[in-house]
Image: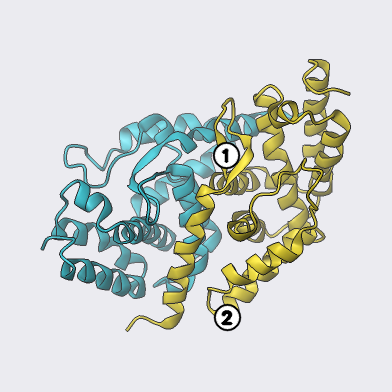
Chain colours: A cyan, B yellow
Amino acid sequence: MISDDLLKQIEFIKEIDKIKYIKRRTKLFNSDQNENDAEHSWHLAMMAIVLSEYSNENIDLLKVIKMVLIHDIVEIDAGDTFIYDQNKNHENTEEELKSAKRIFGILPEKQAAEFIEIWIEFEEGVSNEAKFAKSMDRLEPLLQNTSNNGGTWKEFGVKYETVYNKKKVIENGSTELWNYAEKLIDDIVKKGILEK
Amino acid sequence: MISDDLLKQIEFIKEIDKIKYIKRRTKLFNSDQNENDAEHSWHLAMMAIVLSEYSNENIDLLKVIKMVLIHDIVEIDAGDTFIYDQNKNHENTEEELKSAKRIFGILPEKQAAEFIEIWIEFEEGVSNEAKFAKSMDRLEPLLQNTSNNGGTWKEFGVKYETVYNKKKVIENGSTELWNYAEKLIDDIVKKGILEK
């Protein structure tokens, strides 16, 4: 006999396959191919593992990894929100929360509750784990855009100040990574890629 | 000052982007789109989190996740080996070990050693974590192929016995998941999709 719980978990595993079709604005490294949400989430998890020593605070790495692996699953219903989109409210939690409840709700009750809680904790960005997870989420596209000669900043005419303010979130998770990120931003300003 | 270690870690983070271009034979769920290694690795990590309760033995989930996230990075140099390819030696560890040493070797020494060790542990498949990680690696394409009306089995004329023997590895990690997998295989035999 196959348990009901296992059937729910298998259904969830099939459902989340859909994030592989959700394209982000950002391109892969040195590339003109858009990154999808599964690729992005895998990369953030790898970054969290590799860079955890730079976290400002002690963190539960397993929790950080869970956060970054699941953080974009809500986009299956809610779609990707471009970080530099000025017309869309980025505190779009109504739509995303509904999506989280539907998709994580496919899981057995206790597990569903755990996933929703972790997702909310990430979104709130208050805990040490959420701060570090968000640093990863801001650092990856910074690395991609600099490798792509400006990438989405150039493509959508995003200015220095906007980039700087969005990226400053990295500092909440890691001062050392923010020092590096600031240097990267300075370098591309000097190269004339990002307009100050 | 940016430390040498951090620069090495950033270089590694850029290098591993390449797995997003490595296509597997298996297709996404209900799809004719090939899965790439980053998507596959993300999905295995999600499955490990969701299904860890079914492991035969107590496992360190963080280690299992590290295993599945990094297990295909060696394919950047060594390429993807199709599990049902009869002409290629699947104990192709010379080429893959060389690749592991080059790519993980980009990292600072201690971290490089840790990653190589975890990768070897996964390949050997002896520890509880490796057994469970390998269950995930066999279960995902089983779910995909059954959702795709036979998928790569049909496409490459793979017979029941071969599928059954490859998939039986799931049992080493989880008897309960193997019971489910066996049922799935039986069902597609009944439907005439897989030839006994």
Q: What is the x, y in percent for residue A144?
A: 35, 57
Q: Is residue A1 visible?
A: no
Q: Residue at horizontal 51%, vertical 60%?
A: B16
- Dots 1 and 2 on the same chain: yes
Numbered disc 1: what chain?
B
Q: Nearest the camera: A130 or B117? A: B117
Looking at the rendered structure, the kind of residue marked 2 is: Glu
Crowding near pointer 2: few (<14 within 10 Å), some, many (20+)? few
Q: Which residue is mark 2?
A: B109
Looking at the rendered structure, the kind of residue marked 1 is: Glu
Q: What is the x, y in percent for residue B180?
A: 78, 32
Q: Secondary structure at mark 2?
A: helix
Q: N-terminal of the two: label 1 or label 2? A: 1
Q: Secondary structure at mark 1?
A: strand
Horizontal side, residue B131 vs residue B40: left or right? right
The number of numbered discs placed on residues in the rendered structure image is 2
Q: Residue at horizontal 43%, vertical 32%?
A: A76
The answer to which quarter of the image holds residue B117 is bottom right
Q: Nearest the camera: B51 or A44? A: A44
Q: Which residue is mark 1?
A: B35
Q: Is residue A170 visible?
A: yes
Q: What is the x, y in percent for residue A172?
A: 32, 66
Q: What is the x, y in percent for residue A21?
A: 45, 34
Q: Nearer the viewer, mark 1 or mark 2?
A: 1
Q: Residue at horizontal 47%, vertical 71%?
A: B9
Q: Residue at horizontal 31%, vertical 33%?
A: A94
Q: Nearest the camera: B38 or A33? A: A33
Q: How far is mark 1 from mark 2, CA to CA?
A: 32 Å
